[in-house]
Amino acid sequence: MKRLIIFFCISMFSSIVADGGSIIGLDFSPGSSYNRINLKTVQDTGDYLNGGRLFLYPTEIEFNQNPRVYVSVELNLNSSLTDPYVAVISANSTTDVTIKVYRIDAVTGTSTEAANNEVQLHIFAIEILESNPV
């Protein structure tokens, strides 16, 4: 039986730029031995800008391929409390990601792009393993 142990070794030295100090270590057991894989991660937060929000990955983090990006939308004082928001990754590369946010009118169902500072975005990008290590 294969076991997977995930632990986080996170150093928090965030500033205006994205946090480039996070590494997730994966220990897995193929049989009776353990192996370690370190995955690069980036997290960042910023207000939405009409036209799309660009997040640059720190130069210390060199993704070998486009990372998997998770996005959450946080409402603020400028947000609609009745309309849902949808985040769309419009571009993703090894150096940056662009995210667009749309507000869906709860009555008509029409979508419009969110205005400047209407919502706040939180991203988490993680390296994708090229092959299954287990």
Image (spheres, helix red, strand yellow):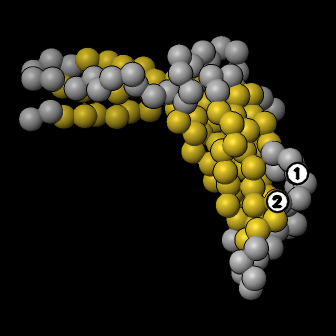
Residue at 35 percent across and 27 percent down: it is 26
The local secondary structure at tag 2 comes to strand
Contact? badges 2 and 1 (CB < 8 Å): yes
Residue 27 is at least partly visible in this image: no
Residue at 76 percent across and 68 percent down: it is 111
Residue 87 in picture, x, y percent from top left:
68, 54
Give residue 107's quadrant in the image.
Answer: bottom right
> In the displayed structure, does residue 96 sit left or right of residue 16?
left
- Callout 2 crowding tier (Cα within 10 Å): few <14, some 14–19, many ≥20: some
Give the number of callouts: 2
Kindly give the residue lying farthest to the right in the view shown: 116
Residue 125 in picture, x, y percent from top left:
58, 35
Amino acid at dot 2: Glu
Q: Is residue 113 above or below residue 51?
A: below
Give residue 54's quadrant in the image.
Answer: top right
Frontmost residue, 133 versus 74: 133
Q: Is residue 131 above or below residue 117?
A: above
Question: If the image is split into quadrants, where does the C terminus sit?
Answer: top left
Amino acid at dot 1: Asn
Residue 78 in picture, x, y percent from top left:
87, 66
The local secondary structure at tag 1 comes to loop
Q: Which residue is mark 1?
A: 50
Residue at 57 percent across and 39 percent down: it is 69
Residue at 81 percent across and 65 percent down: it is 112
Q: Earlier in the sequence, mark 2 or mark 1?
A: 1
> In the displayed structure, does residue 67 sit left or right of residue 59?
left
Q: Which residue is mark 2?
A: 113
